[in-house]
Image: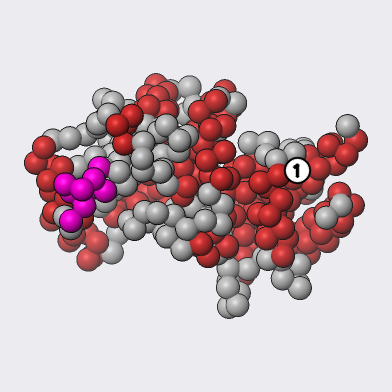
Amino acid sequence: MSPAEMDYVIDNSSRKLFQSAVPPVRYWLLRQVMDKGERHPLIRQALYECAAYRPKLKLLEKLRPDGTWPIPGNKRLAEDAGPGPPVGWTYRTMLWNLFALSEYKTSRDEGNVEAALGKLIEWQDDDGYIPGPWTDIFPLPHFNAYALYLLVRFGLEKESCVQKMTRWLLSMQRADGGWNLPFVMDLHYLPEYRAMRLRDFLEFVRSKSWKSFDLEGLTQFPSCPYVTMVVVWGLMQQKKVARSVAVKRGGDFVLSWFFKRTPHPSYYMTEDHWTKLRYPYRFGSGLMALDVLTELGYGPDDPWMERPLKWLLNARSSDGFWSQSDRPHPERDQWISLIALRTLKRYGSAQAAEKIE
C-alpha cells in the first residue's frame, strides 16, 4: 500500500472513530493519530470529559484506602488458602484496574491510586521482582513487566523500585533475545523432569528452593514471543532502555515469531492467536506486537514487517473499524481501532520518510 493510500485509511477511520469515541479514546486519538497538541481545544475538552468519565470514577470509588480492589468471594477464598497477596487475584485485579485508570488519564494523586502503587512497591523483593500472582515459587517476567509499565506510566520512572525491577528483567533475558516463564518453559522440558505433571514439577522446584539457574545452560529451548512482547512493552517505557540493545534484541525475537505456533504447551500455541484482536493487553497478541514494534521504530525498511501490517490492514471492517469479534463491543472495539490506527500512523510516517529519502 502506498503512503497516500495508507493516509486515506488512517484519515477515514480516524474521522469516524472521533465522532463516536468515548472521552479517553478521543484523547489518545487526537494525540497519537491526529497530532493535536495538549493546548488544542479538542484535547482540553477530551481531558475535561475524561475527568468525569463514569468507568474511571467507578474504579476510583471501589479502590480502597489500602490500595486494593475487592475481589469475588471464590477468588478471596482461594487467595486466603494460599500464601496471600501478591499471590492471588488481588494482585491481578490491581494490575488490570491500574492499567485501565492509566488509559483513562488518571493521575496518581486521584483517589487511592498512590496507595495502590505503594502496595506494588511494598511487595517488591530485594532482587527487584514482585512475586506472584499465580505462584510464589519463582518470579514471572511478564507480570513484572506489567507492573513496571504502570509504575513508569504513573510517574515513578526515577524511583529506585523501577530501576531495580528493570535490572532484574534485563538479567532474565535469554541468549535468543527473548524471555520465558523460568523453569516452566525450559527446565521442565529436560528428560528427567518432562514426565512430571506441572503441579508436581512446581512443588519439586519449591522443595529445592530454586529461584534462578544458569540461563546459558538451557539455550536449546526457545523463549516465548508472548512473554517477550510484554517484557519489551514494560521496559520500553523508559526512553533510555527503549534504545538499548536488549530491547532491540527482544523486538527482533518477537517479529521473528510472528504468525508462528509457539512450542510451549504452558502458553498459547496456535498460530491464529496472533490474529485475534483483543483489548486490553493481557498476555500478548499480534496487535500488541505491532503496537510495540512500531513504537520502537520498526517500519517498512524491515521486510519482516510487511506481512503483519498487511494482516492488520485487511482486518479492518467495512465500517472502517477493527473489532474483537462479529459481536461488536462498542468501547472495547474503539480501543482496538485506536491501537490499530496509531500503529498504522507510525508505520505510514516511516513509509513516507523512507520514500522522501
Residue at x 16%, y 47% (from the top left corner): 192
Residue at x 50%, y 44% (from the top left corner): 229
Looking at the picture, does residue 253 appear above or below residue 59?
above
Q: Based on the picture, tell me whether residue 188 belongs to the magenta stretch.
A: yes
The x and y percentages for residue 73 are: 23, 65
- Image quarter of the N terminus: bottom right
| Residue located farthest toward the bottom when viewing the structure as drawn | 327
Residues in magenta, as a range: 187-195
Looking at the picture, does residue 349 appear above or below residue 311?
above
Question: Residue 267 falls in which quadrant of the image?
Answer: bottom left
Would you call the spot at circle 1 few (<14 residues within 10 Å), some (14-19), or many (20 or more)?
Answer: some
Looking at the picture, does residue 196 appear above or below residue 357?
below
Disc 1 target residue = 300
Question: Residue 161 falls in which quadrant of the image?
Answer: top left
Q: Based on the picture, tell me whether residue 145 belongs to the magenta stretch.
A: no
Residue at x 44%, y 55% (from the top left corner): 262
Q: Nearer the viewer, residue 182 or 13?
A: 182
The x and y percentages for residue 134 are: 26, 51
Left or right: residue 172 compared with residue 84: right
